[in-house]
Image (spheres, rainbow, N blue to C red):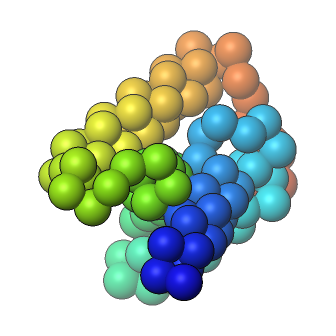
Amino acid sequence: MQHFKKKLRGGVLVGVGYMLSPLSWWNDVFFNLPIALVLGYIASWLHPGWFVPGTLAGYWLSNVAGMVMMQFGATDILLANDQRNARRDLLIGFGSSTLYTLGVVTLVYWHVLEIPSFLENLSP
């Protein structure tokens, strides 16, 4: 029974992590962007100029959370407890999400991707 619970927990982590991760093309609209905008809005309460940096940080954090959840879930499913390395999993999730976010920011900076006009008007 313990083995089944571990596999079930791993499956849930992989599923939720996939929805937050940069690996699905549709996740940004439904998950990451709303999370990022909420965090940007909260940051703008602290300082009016922090909306955009808070949104970027929220976007990055939601991607990091997704990648890390997927890695922890996959290790629950595939590996025994003695083979887990939580620090390595965290660093891989952090690194891959950071590279993805830097790629998106670079594409926006060079106008390969355009920011939707409704996002430009959200800044308080």
Residue 106 left/right relative to 81: right
Question: In the rendered view, would you say 109 is above or below 72?
Answer: above
Residue 48's x, y, as percent?
A: 44, 73
96 or 102, which is in the foreground? 96
**Any part of residue 29 in sight:** yes
Residue 74 left/right relative to 19: left
**Any part of residue 57 in sight:** no
Residue 11's x, y, as percent?
A: 63, 63
69 or 6, which is in the foreground? 6
118 or 95, which is in the foreground? 95
Residue 25's x, y, as percent?
A: 78, 36
Residue extending farthest front: 1
Q: Residue at x 59, y 48 (%)?
A: 21
Residue 120 left/right relative to 106: right
Q: Residue at x 48, y 36 (%)?
A: 101
Q: Residue at x 36, y 83 (%)?
A: 46
The quarter of the image holding the C terminus is bottom right
Count of numbered tags: 0
Q: Residue at x 44, y 60 (%)?
A: 76
User: Residue 97 falls in which quadrant of the image?
Assistant: top left
Residue 118's x, y, as percent?
A: 82, 54
The quarter of the image holding the N terminus is bottom right
Question: In the rendered view, would you say 94 is above or below 107?
Answer: below
